[in-house]
Amino acid sequence: MTEQEFHKLRFSIGEFTKPETITQEHLREWITTIESFPERIESVTKQLNAKELNYKYRPNGWTIKQVAHHCADSHMNSIIRFKLSLTENRPTIRPYYEDRFAKLIDYSEPIDASIFILKGVHEKLSVLLKSFNEADLKREFIHPEHGKRFSLEETIGVYAWHSNHHFSHIEQALRYKESFR
């Protein structure tokens, strides 16, 4: 497998690209994506058996089960990042080692709890995001891993992309089935 083919499997929908100008239409679309993500992931995974939940989306990639658990962990972090940014002046957020999280025991458990978490987090997050005014959208946090500031309006786009990115991984794993064991 070439490096380009591997990259395409890893970023099947491409990498997030911040629009030059973020419009209200972008925000509406992104918030709708975030709002619908738990139902989309539940719909595509609810009939899968244990074998299918262990399909990988690329060589050395995560299983469908790990992707679902990762999304719950990541999106719990996201709501905290949004809330910190709304209540503090340009906070430095705390990154975490998602690859290490994926090796913890809870990632081998059924995904029901993670789907439940996603439903609750996304319901709360959607309410929060829909309430943002122009000043809220411009608030920022500092991500120490990247050494840069992220506005909340950009971060809405990033989490919409993140939802679609991992949903695509699940679809990809189902397409390739046992190819990447």
Image (cartoon, helix red, strand yellow):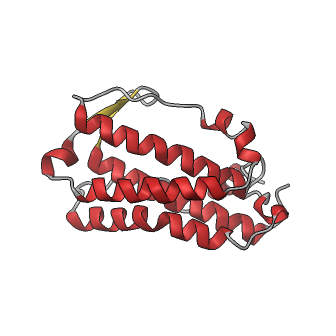
Residue 44 falls left or right of residue 73: right
Residue in front for this viewpoint, 103 or 114: 114
Residue 16 shows in this picture? no
Residue drawn at point x = 80 percent, y = 67 percent = 49
Residue in front for this viewpoint, 127 or 102: 127
What quarter of the picture does the C terminus occupy? bottom right
Residue drawn at point x = 58 percent, y = 58 percent = 115
The image quarter in which residue 97 lies: top right
Residue 44 falls left or right of residue 108: left
Residue 172, given in percent of the width and then of the height, sits at: 68, 66
What quarter of the picture does the N terminus occupy? bottom right
Task: Answer above or below: position of 92 versus 66.
Answer: above
Residue 96 shows in this picture? yes
The image quarter in which residue 165 lies: bottom right
Residue in front for this viewpoint, 38 or 93: 38
Residue drawn at point x = 28 percent, y = 36 percent = 85
Number of numbered discs on residues: 0
The image quarter in which residue 146 lies: top left
Residue drawn at point x = 76 percent, y = 47 percent = 108
Residue 80, given in percent of the width and then of the height, sits at: 39, 39
Residue 54, given in percent of the width and then of the height, sits at: 79, 57
Task: Answer above or below: position of 104 versus 35.
Answer: above
